[in-house]
Amino acid sequence: MAKIAPVNKNILVVAGDPSGDLHAASLIKALKARDPEISVTSIGGVRMQEVSTHFIYNLVSVGAVGFSEPFKHFFLWLKLIKLVRRYLDERRPACVIAVDFYGFNHQVLGLAAHRKIPAFYYISPQVWASRPGRAAKIAKLTKDIFVIFPFETELYRKAGGSASFVGHPLLDMMPAPAAKDFPPPNGEWKIGILPGSRKTEIYRHLPLFVKAFYRIKEQHPKARAYLFAVPEFPDEALVPALEAAEKYWSKDIEIVREKDYSERAKLDFAFTCSGTATLENALLGVPMAVAYRMQKLTYEVAKRVVKTPYISLVNILLKRPAVKELIQEKATVDNLAQEAFSFINNPPRMQAARKELAGLRSLLGERGAAERAAGKILSYLS
């Protein structure tokens, strides 16, 4: 692989949520692989911290998301903006790379533009889902936008920007769907619990998902659940939400933290919070019920601004309700359990769903998203 060296070796990378942290870390590694002398300063999470030269702040652990949550962290935002401003003034990086997380990153991009520092967006925010007007703002502030869904390129080009489809980075991380028999031997169903990656999501969804799992266990006593947790939340942070499920959980529910999706690939069905996890499950061929609860005010605002008929990436990509979506008052234990039983008690439907979900891979381009984005960035900078 040819190495392209930028004139300036300093780069700032900013992400604000767990999935952004994961993909930003891969991009940082790809940049350093092309030029080991690059110095990366980052704001993000634990994965970025592991691979960065300098780390400013763990923004991912704050967990600010939605329409009202960021206001709770207003003074932290001001502090971080000051830190970014100082870094840009003192270090004059070769470029700024924003990764998703529009609320904070568009301010960072504005600071870079004011100082005539080139900026790129890797994994642009899903502005097509709720606020298409933001596409023009991103286009104005960036030199190039590296998108991970093929339909996004035209959106940004119409907004006057430069956009490149680099493929979806999950393709480099996901194993192929596992071959499975249904029903499983001895009725040992493996049920996934994915309540979200932010504190508010976990506390709203985890009790629901645990109670729904116990409905399954009533009919299938050998069923086991696997709670997939992010590094930002240790076991002790999950216990209060688990205890809210009103069942003794430890003997039946295993907490899993993994980097290679090997355990997730073994699941038969999953209760999943809306987000990147829905696409991860699909690429692994895991059928699911998708749920999301939010504050009432946030929901009322969301209803008025969301432009897509679906909340899960699976349904958005397939343009139809391939997986069940249970939002707000519909996200109940009864509805979650009912959807699970519609698969567990119908093995042919289970197999058909696995095949359909795994077929999403063909819509997401080729492997090597981070490497392609890194190559384009360094080419621009040389």
Image (cartoon, grey):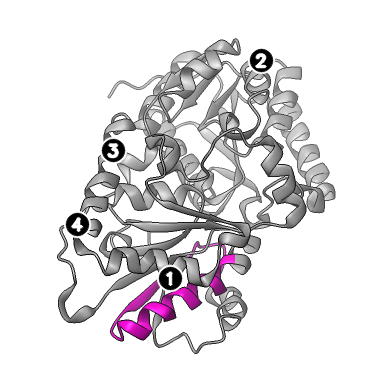
| Res. 361 mark | 3
Q: Which residue is mark 4?
A: 178
Q: Position of residue 114 (x, y in %)?
A: 76, 18
Q: Which residue is mark 2?
A: 140
Q: Secondary structure at mark 3?
A: helix
Task: Say which label, 4 or 3, has the lower sequence index.
Answer: 4
The span from disc 4 to disc 2 (Cα, nearest Å) is 44 Å
Check residue 218 for magenta coloring.
yes
**Range of the magenta residues?**
205-233
Could you tell me the amino acid type at mark 3? Arg
Do labels 4 and 2 touch, CB within 8 Å? no
Q: Position of residue 110 (x, y in %)?
A: 73, 24
Q: Which residue is mark 1?
A: 337
Q: Secondary structure at mark 4?
A: loop
Could you tell me the amino acid type at mark 4? Ala
Q: Position of residue 180 (x, y in %)?
A: 16, 62
The span from disc 2 to disc 1 (Cα, nearest Å) is 47 Å
Callout in the foreground (3, 1): 1
Give the side of residue 133 with respect to residue 145, left or right: right
* Vertical side of 236 occupied by 30: above or below: above
Task: Say which label, 2 or 1, has the lower sequence index.
Answer: 2
Q: Secondary structure at mark 2?
A: helix
Which residue lies at the image location 19% right of the left edge and 59% below the top edge?
348
Task: Say which label, 2 or 3, has the lower sequence index.
Answer: 2
Task: Say which label, 3 or 1, has the lower sequence index.
Answer: 1
The span from disc 3 to disc 1 (Cα, nearest Å) is 28 Å
Q: Find residue 207 and report its image quarter.
A: bottom right
Q: Position of residue 73 (x, y in %)?
A: 79, 51
Callout in the foreground (2, 1): 1
Check residue 104 for magenta coloring.
no
